[in-house]
Image (cartoon, helix red, strand yellow):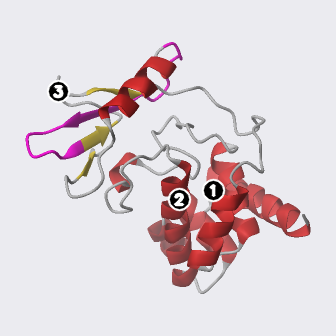
Amino acid sequence: MRESSIGSDQKRLPVFLIATCLILLSALPAAADIYMYIDGQGVMHFTNVPTSNNYRVYIKARPWHRGASHDSKRFDRLIDEAATLHGVAFPLIKAVIRAESAFDPRAISKKGALGLMQIMPQNLQAFKVNNPFDPWQNIMAGVRYLKRLLHRFNGQVPLALAAYNAGPEAVDASRGIPPFPETEAYVRRVMKFFYLYKKG
């Protein structure tokens, strides 16, 4: 995985917040720990594969399961704000969050994807996210990307979801949902949650 960096012109994480995260999570078993260091120009670098001794553990991964029980209404206000701001359906956003992280804001996948909408570390800078575990930042970034995919695939939700999981290039190459078991299962799962929340 390529590392990600965040410029000094963006809001930096307070040192005490980083320290608090480390203290609170230090006893948790590692799965895909995320490392960080701040270089001489004040740029924050994130990676799950540290390439030097300058990196320190930013947050230790917690094992999580997609079916884990979390308060599904906890982030409704933020989801509604993102839905209104970006013109993406509330039930769809909520369905993606449920499938991606089971509403766990500190979820880290085995591949290193972070937070509620599972943003990869190398995408943090592009999405202007300086704290992927902040629910508001994570949801806003994830929804901006989802909106981009919906536009790219002419509002076809299953294709946008497939692209969210496997990448838009894979969807383009397949001219449809890529024949990957993980992606096919992901699209079915999110669509099921989508219709469930639409009935809501």
Please name the amino acid that badge 3 sits on: Asn
Q: Secondary structure at mark 1?
A: helix
- In the displayed structure, 33 sits above or below 172; it is above
Of marks 2 and 3, which one's residue comes earlier in the chain? 3
Residue 89 within the segment the image draws in magenta? no
**Crowd tier of the residue under label 3, counting other residues whose Cα lies within 10 Å: few below 14, some 14–19, many 20 or above:** few
Of marks 2 and 1, which one's residue comes earlier in the chain? 2
Residue 133 seen in the current view: yes
Of marks 1 and 3, which one's residue comes earlier in the chain? 3
Q: Which mark is residue 54?
A: 3
Left or right, 93 with reference to 164:
right
Residue 124: x %, y % from top left: 37, 54
Q: Which residue is disc 2 drawn over?
A: 166
Residue sitting at x 77%, y 48%: 72
Q: CA distance from mark 2 to mark 3?
A: 32 Å
Q: Residue furthest top?
A: 27
Residue 109: x %, y % from top left: 53, 38
Left or right, 138 with reference to 1:
right
Q: Which residue is disc 1 drawn over?
A: 183
Left or right, 128 with reference to 29:
left
Residue sitting at x 37%, y 56%: 123
Q: Quadrant of residue 153?
A: bottom right
- Secondary structure mostly seen in magenta is loop
Between marks 1 and 3 in the image, the one whose residue lies nearer the viewer: 3
Q: Which residues are magenta?
A: 27-44
Label pair 2/1, CB-CB below 8 angstroms: yes
Label pair 2/3, CB-CB below 8 angstroms: no
Residue 175 seen in the current view: no
Q: Residue furthest bottom?
A: 154
